[in-house]
Image (spheres, rainbow, N blue to C red):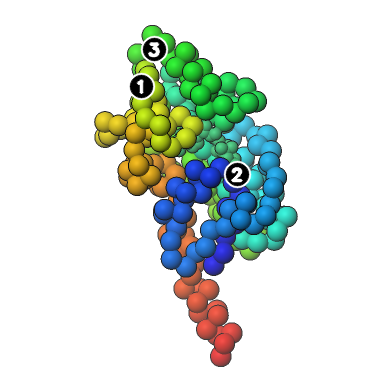
């Protein structure tokens, strides 16, 4: 089965390809030759994920999925949330977003936060959503240069390193994206016997 992944973020493609293996071939927008910046105008991760997958489904009529992720900081009332990519402005700078976050958390004792990923999968025009959550803490200074976004300031619960100090596989042990993607894989593998039996009966 081929699935277009409606994202322009190469880090997301690498992380998701580490989980989706076997019979499902993930094709990034770049690989599909689609060069668009899909708007994310809504106020929930769910609606923005749907916007991205629906846009690509309508354009290609191919089965596809997208994901929207937000960092939700408890003492900031869930900020930056849906604004995670543009927290410090339209420039979408990871550096400036982190600076703004650390500034807002100066002298704040409760630094609990979570990443939440929502995947929107469209198969034959029908949408299914999958969620993955990773709880952790925002530290006071950046550590590590791996990953992307807020990874250098986020330590998942149960770890002593930031996501920025982890390899892709280590991040996968804790990651919101891995958890949501695993639900997608289970969903697809539950569907595949139906596909297999359909194709078998077609052959007969
Ligand atoms: P697409 O919409 O093209 O998929 P994007 O980077 O714009 O890519 P989002 O709208 O989901 O993706 O942006 C959410 C932002 O949250 C992203 O730019 C990062 O700053 C941050 N983010 C998302 N996942 C993250 C992760 O696993 N680790 C650190 N930061 C992350």
Q: CA gap, disc 3 to disc 1? A: 11 Å
Image check: 123 left or right of 70? right
Judge whether 17 appears above or below 76 on screen.
below
Q: Residue at x 59, y 46 (%)?
A: 7
- Label 2 crowd (10 A; few <14 / some 14-19 / many >=20): some
**Image marks 3 and 1: residues in contact by CB distance under 8 Å:** no
Give the numbered dot on residue 41: none
Image check: 63 left or right of 110? right
Q: Which residue is mark 1?
A: 139
Choose top left, top right, bottom left or bottom right for residue 83: top right
Q: CA gap, disc 1 to disc 2? A: 28 Å
Q: Residue at x 47, y 14 (%)?
A: 104
Q: Position of residue 175 (x, y in %)?
A: 39, 41
Give the numbered dot on residue 108: 3
Q: Residue furthest front?
A: 145
- Quadrant containing the C terminus is bottom right
Q: Residue furthest bottom?
A: 204
Ligand 1 contact, mark 3 (Cβ < 8 Å) = no
Ligand 1 contact, mark 2 (Cβ < 8 Å) = yes
Q: Which residue is mark 2?
A: 8
Q: CA gap, disc 2 to disc 3? A: 34 Å
Judge whether 8 appears above or below 138 on screen.
below
Closer to the N terminus: mark 3 or mark 1? 3
Secondary structure of the residue carrying tag 3 is loop
Q: Residue at x 55, y 85 (%)?
A: 201
Kindly tell me whether residue 28 is visible in this rendering: yes
Secondary structure of the residue carrying tag 2 is loop
Viewer-nearest of discs 1 and 2: 2
Image check: 134 left or right of 68? left
């Amino acid at each position: 089965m081929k699935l277009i992944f409606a994202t322009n973020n190469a880090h997301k493609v690498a992380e998701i390809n580490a989980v989706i293996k076997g019979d499902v071939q993930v094709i990034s927008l770049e690989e599909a030759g689609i060069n668009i910046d899909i708007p994310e105008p809504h106020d929930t991760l769910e609606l923005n994920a749907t916007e991205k997958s629906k846009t690509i489904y309508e354009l290609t009529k191919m089965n596809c999925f997208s994901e929207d992720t937000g960092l939700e900081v408890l003492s900031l009332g869930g900020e930056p949330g849906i604004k995670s990519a543009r927290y410090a402005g339209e420039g979408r700078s990871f550096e400036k977003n982190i600076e703004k976050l650390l500034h807002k958390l100066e002298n704040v004792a409760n630094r609990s936060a979570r990443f939440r990923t929502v995947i929107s999968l469209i198969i034959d025009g029908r949408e299914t959503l999958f969620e993955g959550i990773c709880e952790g803490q925002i530290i006071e200074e950046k550590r590590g240069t791996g990953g992307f976004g807020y990874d250098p300031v986020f330590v998942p619960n149960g770890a002593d390193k930031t996501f920025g100090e982890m390899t892709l596989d280590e991040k996968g042990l804790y990651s919101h994206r891995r958890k949501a993607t695993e639900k997608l894989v289970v969903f697809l593998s539950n569907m595949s016997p139906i596909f297999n039996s359909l194709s078998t009966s077609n052959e007969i």
